[in-house]
């Protein structure tokens, strides 16, 4: 996709973000747009950067290792968010490549991250709010206990919660999922809420998302 196309898409997205924030009585400055750049080439990421994007989300450690070195000279460097499932044997590499992990989905993984991190590393706990068998994440019932255990680990900074909502045609169907995650975040007194993708980000913003993860809306359909 050309830079001009990305800019056009981004302008339209920003208008929608602003409208959703107005409906919710929120400031657009409280919502971070993360461009999901999985399968997007380094050239495509550069175009998005030139359009003003500074936060990028990737699913796989190996993909970042292969394409992001081509972007090493960009200044300031983009903030890289790991939004896909992280295997324990990839933790060391992930800590070197990413600035933020959204997909902390087990106590075992938390312990590995804390042990291998050289500093307090910012993470979000992934919650499988809808209880889908195909999704990773803590169950709603297990979240509070898991949070208490993970909060004791020395090298993790729990910034908030993340979820991947079910794929539906009508975003209103997943509003209860977003609302429940916000209520869980509020009960734990955490600042960040990563939820909402290309098909439902406005609903997520209305329900309190502080980070939205958009791929298709920015880069177009994956080839």
Image (spheres, rainbow, N blue to C red):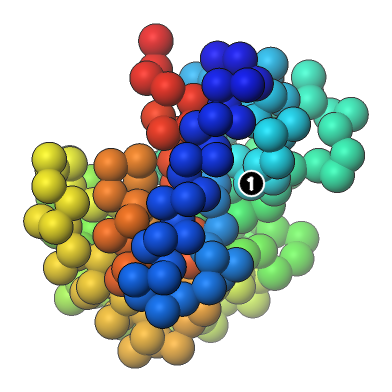
Is residue 104 found left or right of 172 in the rendered image?
right
Is residue 52 found left or right of 71 in the rendered image?
left
Q: Residue at 69% across / 34% down in the picture?
A: 51
Give the quarter of the image for residue 184. bottom left
Q: Position of residue 97 (x, y in %)?
A: 70, 40
Is residue 138 found left or right of 190 in the rendered image?
left
Give the quarter of the image for residue 73. top right
Disc 1 packing (10 Å; few <14; some 14–19; many ≥20): many
Q: Residue at 28% across / 49% down in the picture?
A: 200
Can you say which quadrant of the picture contains the C terminus? top left
Pick the residue in front: 193 or 62. 193
Q: Is residue 48 above or below residue 96?
A: above
- Residue 147 seen in render: no
Pick the residue in front: 12 or 43. 12
Q: Is residue 97 above or below residue 123?
A: above
Q: Kindly identify which residue carries mark 1.
A: 55
Q: Residue furthest top?
A: 223
- Residue 56 seen in render: yes
Q: Position of residue 219 (x, y in %)?
A: 49, 25
Q: Is residue 133 above or below residue 176?
A: above
Q: Position of residue 16 (x, y in %)?
A: 41, 51
């Amino acid at each position: 996709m050309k830079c001009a196309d990305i800019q056009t898409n981004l302008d339209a997205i920003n208008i929608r973000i602003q409208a959703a924030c107005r409906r919710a009585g929120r400031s657009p400055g409280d919502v971070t747009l993360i461009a999901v750049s999985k399968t997007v080439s380094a050239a495509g990421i550069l175009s998005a950067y030139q359009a003003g994007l500074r936060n990028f989300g990737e699913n796989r450690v190996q993909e970042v290792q292969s394409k992001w070195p081509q972007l090493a000279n960009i200044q300031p460097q983009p903030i890289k968010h790991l939004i896909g499932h992280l295997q324990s044997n990839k933790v060391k590499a992930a800590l070197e490549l990413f600035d933020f992990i959204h997909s902390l989905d087990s106590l075992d993984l938390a312990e590995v991250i804390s042990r291998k991190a050289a500093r307090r590393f910012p993470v979000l706990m992934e919650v499988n709010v809808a209880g889908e068998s195909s999704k990773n994440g803590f169950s709603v019932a297990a979240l509070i206990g898991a949070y208490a255990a993970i909060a004791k680990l020395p090298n993790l900074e729990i910034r908030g919660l993340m979820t991947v909502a079910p794929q539906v045609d009508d975003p209103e169907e997943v509003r209860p999922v977003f609302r429940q995650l916000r209520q869980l975040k509020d009960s734990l007194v955490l600042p960040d809420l990563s939820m909402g993708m290309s098909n439902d980000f406005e609903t997520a913003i209305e329900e309190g998302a502080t980070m939205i993860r958009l791929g298709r809306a920015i880069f177009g359909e994956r080839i």
